[in-house]
Amino acid sequence: MSSIKNEHRLAHKLILSVIAAFLVSAAFFLVLQNTARNMIRSYCARPEVIAAHLEKKADSLQHYIKDHNISISGILELDGWVAREDLTTVAVYYDDKLLYSSYMVFPNFSLKSKTPYESLSLNNSYTLTFCDGEALVFISDLFAHRYTDYATYLNLVIFFLCFIIIMILLISKKVAYINTLEQEIQVLEGGNLNYAITIKGNDELASLALEIDEMRRAFIAREQYADRMRAAGNELMTGISHDLRTPLTALIGYLEVMEGEEVPTKQSPFLQKCKNRAFQINGLINDLFEYFFVSTSGDEQLQLGTYAAREALNEIIRDYAFLMERSGFTVINHIELPPGSIKVDGDMIQRVFDNLLSNIRRYADPAHPVRLESIFQCHELLLIIHNRILDYPETVRHTGLGLKTCEKMMSLQGGRFIYGHQDGCYTVQLGFTLI
């Protein structure tokens, strides 16, 4: 089998694709992240932006104080507002004293004194009204961090989208090639074995395509070989028919003439033996042709139909018994057919019984009766035939080719055929599935 040279593992390619997609996406993410931070830092450093944002916070706190009727003496109730306002700190001064701070290290100083905490300028101080008076409130909010978090979340989404898009672009050719292979395999399944498989690349997919194409070519070669064998077999059988039937027919004719003439040869004990041997060879040829025909028959040549068991078998069995009686045999018929149906090919069933009749005539002992019986068990109808065998010398024992032909024909119809002998008694069973 051919192989792909310098094969690169598909897994390695996929790993490299993942790494490349990750690096490109990560670089894009870092660029976006750095740009977003610079823009946010520049925007949030503008005094008008800070003032507007703190003004909104002061308004929100004033509404909260009003809605909850918070007094200076109950200043700790501001914890509820602080808890919901993330990244925001509040300090409340009343009469130059710190009454409330949401941050533990918030400076406790006198507003009238000079202190090093001049960052707490009056720019972020607001006078808010409580139920029992007014107080000076300092508000600090790290809203730039909040915007940075939002930008980070957005950049992460862009990172994953970029990663997925790059991966799709990198593996799209492989996916398209897989789809092409799938369509071509469906063409092969449809029976068009002359359709060549596309081989592209040098990885496992290309190797798989090559193996499928070689299997296709091997199957074509096997079919061509089988066709040649069938043609040769047919030619062989034709030759056998021509080469054997002609001299055998002449031999039988000569022997019959010799039997009718009053010559010493008629008294010879070998004359009848020659005739029997000639008829035996002729029957063997017929069996061979029958077996060859059945062995090469396919399911498409069958004409199976569903028939009532009595309708399909009654007449055949009656004719079978009648012909055996005409041949000098005593027939004891105990066959009773059930009311069910069977699925058979009518012509093939007739040929099965014809073969059995031919075997009875050739090999059964007319001094003993032929018994026919039927058994119904487990949705199966069994027809059983018993007869005694003639005590032939070993040199003229039959080959069993006719019985093998019957077995093959019953198998093609989904039935069973069993045969055997014991103590000179031959038994044949035909099994039909009842539906």
Image (tube, grey):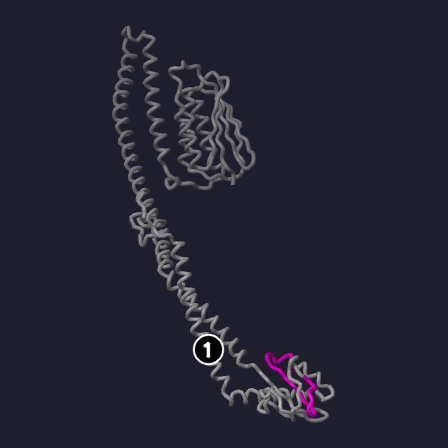
* Badge 1 amino acid: Ala
Would you identify the image quadrant in which residue 34 lies? Answer: bottom left
Residue pictured at 50% horizontal, 30% vertical: 383
Farthest top residue?
Answer: 264
Question: Which class describes the residues within 10 Å of circle 1: few (<14), some (14-19), or many (20+)?
Answer: some
Q: Is residue 132 above or below residue 377?
A: below
Q: Residue at x 27, y 14 (%)?
A: 257
Magenta range: 81-100
Report if residue 99 lies within the magenta region.
Answer: yes
Image position of 66 (left or right of 235): right
Residue 376 position within the rendered picture, expressed as x and y whole percent measured from the top left: 55, 33
Q: Extreme right residue here?
A: 73
Q: Is residue 172 above or below residue 78?
A: above
Does residue 186 appear in this view? no
Q: Position of residue 274 (x, y in %)?
A: 32, 14
Residue 245: x and y in percent read: 28, 24
Taking the image as shown, residue 56 lies to the left or right of residue 399, namely: right
What percent of the width, then of the height, locates residue 199?
Answer: 31, 52
Residue 22 colored in magenta in the image: no
Q: Under tag 1, what secondary structure?
A: helix
Q: Is residue 217 left or right of residue 32?
A: left
Residue behind mark 1: 36
Q: Residue at x 58, y 83 (%)?
A: 141
